[in-house]
Amino acid sequence: MKIYFAGAIRGGRQKVEDYKKMVERFQKHGHTVLTKHVADPNLTVEGSKVTDNEIYVRDTKWLEECDLVFADVTVPSLGVGFEIAYAEKINKKIYAVYEKDKDVSRLILGDTNIEFLPYTCIDDVLDKIDMICTQ
Amino acid sequence: MKIYFAGAIRGGRQKVEDYKKMVERFQKHGHTVLTKHVADPNLTVEGSKVTDNEIYVRDTKWLEECDLVFADVTVPSLGVGFEIAYAEKINKKIYAVYEKDKDVSRLILGDTNIEFLPYTCIDDVLDKIDMICTQ
């Protein structure tokens, strides 16, 4: 499968180590994570030399071609919110995980097109990824 | 016109006084701001007694019926990102304003379907609203 992993970049990098574990778990199952750079602790908020529009064109193309979107919505992020609505509008399967005690957008929590997993520890998320990959 | 104003709620309320000025400026021109609660300083992050799904149904209905979306993207917000992509996919006119020194999502900055206005003071935004309303 091709996975579109969504996590905050400019919104804040405090969860990057968890993003890394999630991406690596998908990869362990032999799947391709199109957006693996999101989980790279060395990614700077400035990113590479690609232009903003090149990012838009690349990411929306990846959204079109992915088999599912897997988003960590713990950290408020314009990009992640954008990716979720975009994916929904083109009928992609969407999973969204978040730390249980965090205030996630109620608009997004109310979206029945998304399958949510509130988690208390990263292992809950990794188990969920195992389940998705062995379905 | 019916305006869908988008601003951060759970993402952070530090810009609410500016949201209020923007919404009031649209109203001064006689337009209806469907989401005027976003600019209410008394709105709590818990919101009212409506359920998350009622918020989703209400907000997506408003997105369908609005004439334009006007978003302040200064504060990272899942909801605002979601609203922008949703609006784009149903071909709504989208304006996005943000404080010049803030790191806005590059995915969103690269979206040529959005008309951006980086601003240094709120008056720049109010002038832009005057322009939109007198076009």
Image (tube, coloured by chain):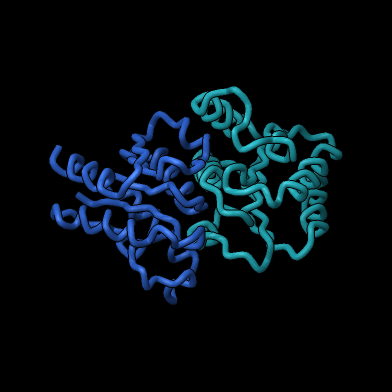
Chain colours: A blue, B cyan
Seen at 84% across and 34% down, the residue is B30
Q: Is A9 left, or right, of B35 in this rendering?
A: left
Measured along the vertical axis of the image, is residue A15 above or below residue A71?
below
Q: Is residue B62 above or below residue A126?
A: above
**Position of residue B31 in the picture relative to residue B58 (left or right):** right
* Extreme residue in the right direction: B28
Front-most of residues B28 and B55: B55
**In the image, what residue occupies the spot 70% across and 37% down?**
B3
Give x and y (percent) for residue A39: 33, 62
Count of number-bearing discs: 0
Of A30 and A85, the residue lying toward us: A30
Instruction: Indicate the quadrant where residue A94 lies.
Output: top left
Q: Quadrant of the C terminus of chain A?
A: top left
For the point 50% across and 62% down, the residue is A10
Image point (33%, 40%), residue name: A95
Image quarter for residue A14?
bottom left
Given residues B22 and A53, the one toward you in this image is: B22
> As displayed, is residue A47 above or below residue B96?
below
**Location of residue B27 in the rendering, given as x and y in whole percent from the top left corner:** 82, 37
Q: Is residue A29 left or right of residue B5?
A: left
Q: Is A40 left or right of B120, judged from the image as shown?
A: left
Image spot of residue A43 (x, y percent): 39, 71
Q: Residue A80: where, in percent of width, then height? A: 45, 50
